[in-house]
Amino acid sequence: MEKIKVIHDAVGHTLTVWLSDPNQEFICEETTDELVIMKDKQGRVIGFELLHYHPKETEKTLTVETILKTGT
């Protein structure tokens, strides 16, 4: 897996997470939960964007938890 890129746009109120290269984006689909899914040409999800994201005023950072599993 490539590096994950997390972008918080405080002006546009979005939180974008790229799971792969953003340049591979081919199509976007908005869900009913105000979530945009970005896909590549093969239909694989390469990112998502949460619309209307407003972090709590008391939080100054974004905490991300990572869990890595190896295939067995």
Image (cartoon, rainbow, N blue to C red):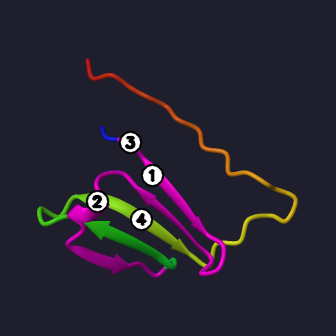
Q: Residues within 10 Å of mark 3 (few under 14, many from 20)?
A: few
* Label 4 with label 2: CB-CB less than 8 Å: yes
Q: Which residue is mark 3?
A: 3
User: Distance of mark 3 from mark 1, alpha carbons?
Assistant: 6 Å
41 left or right, relative to 16: left
Q: Which-is-in-front pick, marks 1 and 4?
A: 1
Query: What label does residue 45 carry, if any?
Result: 2
Q: Residues within 10 Å of mark 1 (few under 14, many from 20)?
A: few
53 left or right, relative to 24: right
User: Distance of mark 1 from mark 4, alpha carbons?
Assistant: 11 Å
**In the image, residue 65 lies at what x, y percent?**
59, 38
Q: Which residue is mark 1?
A: 5
User: Distance of mark 2 from mark 1, alpha carbons?
Assistant: 14 Å
Query: What label does residue 49 carry, if any?
Result: none
Q: Which residue is mark 4?
A: 48
**In the image, residue 20 lies at what x, y percent?**
30, 52
The amino acid beneath tag 3 is Lys
- Residue situated in front as seen by the camera: 47 or 71: 47
Q: Which region shows up in magenta?
A: 3-32
**In the image, residue 54 lies at what x, y percent?**
71, 72
- Quarter assignment of residue 26: bottom left
- Seen at 42% across and 46% down, the residue is 4
- Seen at 26% across and 17% down, the residue is 72
64 left or right, relative to 20: right
SS at circle 4: strand
User: Which mark sits nearer the N-terminus, 2 or 1?
Assistant: 1
User: Which mark sits nearer the N-terminus, 1 or 4?
Assistant: 1
User: Which mark sits nearer the N-terminus, 3 or 4?
Assistant: 3
User: Which mark sits nearer the N-terminus, 3 or 2?
Assistant: 3
The amino acid beneath tag 1 is Lys
Q: Which-is-in-front pick, marks 3 and 4?
A: 3
